[in-house]
Image: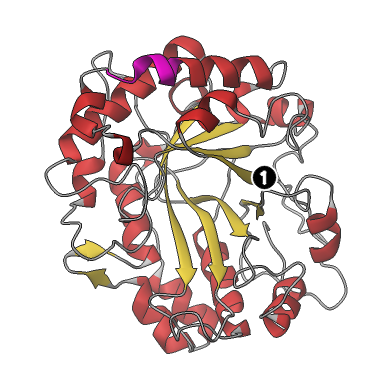
């Protein structure tokens, strides 16, 4: 069996018709809105011609593919020209209490102030080092700051369509170095706080999407149950979260072969999901699309002894994305909606690359998003 076939077999999706999200429920972009924003319309039955030398797609799945970057590489077309494929989505960060109110990334003078495609907007939530807690958040202690955050986003994003926004609230909350970390026993408070933020979102920016995004692996000693973070629906019956995503790096656990990659896809970590397939199945169970909001290979051989220039990782990620993509204009639960390469920090960066020249070449040889 080929690598592609084996990965497809591992990642088969059985999706019930109930999973289709409408514009009203999930606020995903329809063809008319995409055209207004300058994005490509839904694909026709005829396949696009691949550029010379690029690997041919294994399936007809389509997803939004792009880059997460705090510099101009994503927004000025550099990444798009370098890889030879359209960047249909991007990702930025406005972390910390002050940053989430200022929102420099998308406001006047910010690099992303004129971006008019889908945007994954990662923000913080609370700062535990300053005595803030999820219990206080669940009771509304930080509503004023969160309201200011949403009002600022609304003001700076206008007149662009809010449905292009995917707000990644308290991302990687299962890592111990995050100021907004969630530990075992705090899951219910987190879910309640996330629901409070969502309620404010419905009041201020109702068409924007909310993303729940842990790291694929959990820090040791956290004691968190990721399944208990899911908030479901609010008191008004509205879906609190529109997309379940993870951040995933080939750093821990490192996969160096197709067999190791396939094994990690369905791996658990102390009873918690670790592999991408395990997380994707959670999205399917919860009735929302899936995303990989940050991903990268770690090329620094001195970094925790795990880094290496591994082109096969990029090939296998591309195949897994393609196997689980279908139609971002009509996403079903568990289907890949978007993925963003984390082009930050020397050990992860592909453009320019310090540690991963062979991986950069492999990434450029592949077709992304179709």
Residue 55 is at least partly visible in this image: no
* Image: 178 above or below 37: below
Residue 148 point in image, percent of width and height:
49, 16
Furthest toward the top, the residue is: 203
Furthest toward the front, the residue is: 130
Within 10 Å of disc 1 (Cα), the crowding (few <14, some 14-19, many 20+) is many
Furthest toward the left, the residue is: 185
Q: Nearer the viewer, residue 75 or 234?
A: 75
Q: Which residues are magenta?
A: 141-147
* Image: 314 above or below 85: below
Residue 60 point in image, percent of width and height:
64, 60
Residue 338 point in image, percent of width and height:
57, 50
Q: Is 152 part of what is drawn in magenta?
A: no
Q: Is residue 221 left or right of residue 207?
A: left
* Image: 18 above or below 350: above
Quarter placement of the C terminus: bottom right
Please give the residue where the numbered disc 1 appears in the rendered image. 89
Colour basis: secondary structure
Figure quadrant of residue 161: top right
Badge 1 element: strand
Callout count:
1
Residue plotted at (84% across, 55% down): 78
Residue 258 point in image, percent of width and height:
48, 86
Figure quadrant of residue 140: top left
Q: Nearer the viewer, residue 331 or 154?
A: 154
Residue 256 is at least partly visible in this image: yes
Q: Is residue 2 left or right of residue 44?
A: left
Residue plotted at (53% across, 35% down): 166
Classified by dominant secondary structure, the portion drawn in magenta counts as: helix
């Amino acid at each position: 069996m080929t690598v592609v076939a084996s990965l497809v077999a591992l990642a088969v999706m059985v999706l019930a018709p109930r999973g289709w999200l409408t514009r009203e429920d999930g606020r995903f972009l329809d063809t008319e809105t995409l055209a207004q924003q300058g994005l490509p319309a839904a694909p026709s039955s005829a396949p696009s011609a691949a550029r010379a030398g690029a690997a041919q797609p294994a399936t007809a799945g389509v997803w939004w593919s792009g880059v997460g970057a705090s510099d101009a590489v994503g927004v000025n077309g550099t990444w798009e020209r370098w890889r030879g494929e359209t960047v249909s989505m991007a990702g930025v960060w406005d972390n910390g209490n002050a940053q989430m109110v200022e929102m420099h990334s998308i406001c006047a003078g910010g690099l992303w102030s004129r971006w008019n495609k889908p945007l994954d907007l990662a923000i913080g939530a609370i700062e535990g080092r300053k005595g803030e807690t999820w219990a206080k958040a669940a009771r509304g202690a930080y509503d004023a700051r969160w309201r200011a955050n949403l009002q600022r986003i609304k003001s700076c994003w206008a007149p662009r369509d809010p449905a292009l926004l995917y707000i990644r609230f308290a991302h990687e909350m299962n890592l111990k170095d995050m100021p907004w970390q969630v530990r075992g026993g705090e899951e219910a408070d987190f879910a309640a706080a996330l629901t409070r933020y969502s309620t404010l979102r419905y009041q201020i920016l109702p068409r924007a999407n909310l993303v729940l995004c842990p790291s694929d692996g959990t820090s040791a000693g956290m004691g968190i149950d990721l399944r208990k973070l899911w908030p479901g629906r609010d008191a008004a019956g509205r879906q609190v979260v529109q997309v379940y995503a993870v951040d995933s790096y080939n750093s821990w656990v490192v996969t160096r072969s197709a067999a190791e990659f396939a094994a990690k896809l369905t791996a658990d970590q102390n009873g918690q999901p670790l592999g991408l397939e395990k997380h994707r199945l959670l999205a399917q169970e919860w009735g929302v699309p899936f995303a990989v909001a940050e991903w990268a290979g770690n090329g620094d051989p001195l970094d925790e002894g795990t880094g290496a220039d591994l082109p096969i990782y990029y090939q296998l990620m591309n195949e897994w994305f393609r196997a689980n993509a279908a139609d971002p204009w009509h996403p079903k639960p568990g289907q890949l909606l978007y993925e963003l390469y984390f082009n930050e920090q020397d050990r992860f960066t592909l453009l320019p690359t310090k540690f991963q020249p062979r991986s950069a070449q492999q990434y450029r040889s592949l077709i992304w998003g179709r």
